[in-house]
Amino acid sequence: QAAQQFGTDIAVQRDDMDTWGRRIVVFDMDSTLIQGEVIDELAKLAGVEEQVKAITAAAMRGEIDFAQSLRQRCALLKGHNAAELFTQVKQGIRFTPGARVLTQTLKQLGFKMAVISGGFVDVARYVRAELGLDYAFANELATDQDGNFTGETTGPLVTPERKRTLLGMIAEVEGCDVEQVVAVGDGANDIPMLTTSGLGVA
């Protein structure tokens, strides 16, 4: 009743040292901190929206895994200029209502914050800067000498398992236990991160 009356979500937690000892909040990016999916926006600009949607649908049906679907979608961007597309995507980013207030409040309370995304690092770094986060991890799209996408990624893919690993790494760097981490995400690829943290918010 109170949630309906005030138009908000209410989560009840045990009043103990674990609750008060939390020090890090880790966020997913697409459809969590920002509205929409970056790969979809890149696909629209590159004129391959329908092909990307078909691959995404196949992944949701379980026909291909996350890494395979990401590689296939990235391949469709080959030949397009990275700076031009990412500039347009960043100009169109809409932050989720309340994201700025939430991150500002957490920073004032002394929390360290990170964005760990299966999306792309160019946008993740932009989100980190805009919201005052401390860490940003995401996939990096490879480019050729002319600054055009090669259709491949470079470095380790941020898979669901890597999200969990990065969460643990941040906790270690900050000198705290994973039980002191709050993880926030919206998709199946966030489940390992959500279940590893002390508190998962979906």
Image (cartoon, rainbow, N blue to C red):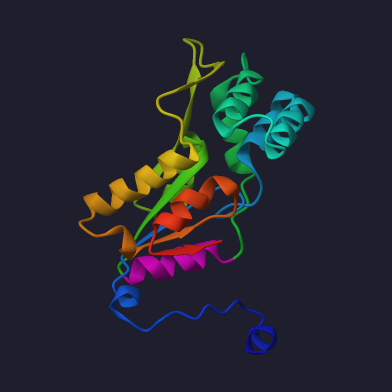
- Image check: 137 left or right of 45? left
- Image check: 198 left or right of 92? left
Q: Is residue 8 above or below residue 95?
A: below
| Viewer-proximal residue among 58 and 88 | 58
Which residue occupies the extreme top position in the image?
145
- Image check: 22 left or right of 36? left
Q: What's the magenta region?
A: 98-109
Please check the rendered image and state whether residue 107 is part of the magenta-colored stretch, yes or no.
Answer: yes
Q: Is residue 131 visible?
A: no
Give the residue at x 42% y 70%.
Answer: 105
Which residue occupies the extreme front position in the image?
62
Q: Position of residue 34 (x, y in %)?
A: 59, 52
| Viewer-proximal residue among 107 and 63 | 63
Q: Is residue 90 above or below residue 107?
A: above
Give the residue at x 52% y 51%.
Answer: 191
Q: Position of residue 165 (x, y in %)?
A: 36, 43
Which residue occupies the extreme right position in the image?
50
Q: Is residue 134 above or below residue 80?
A: below
Please check the rendered image and state whether residue 103 is part of the magenta-colored stretch, yes or no.
Answer: yes
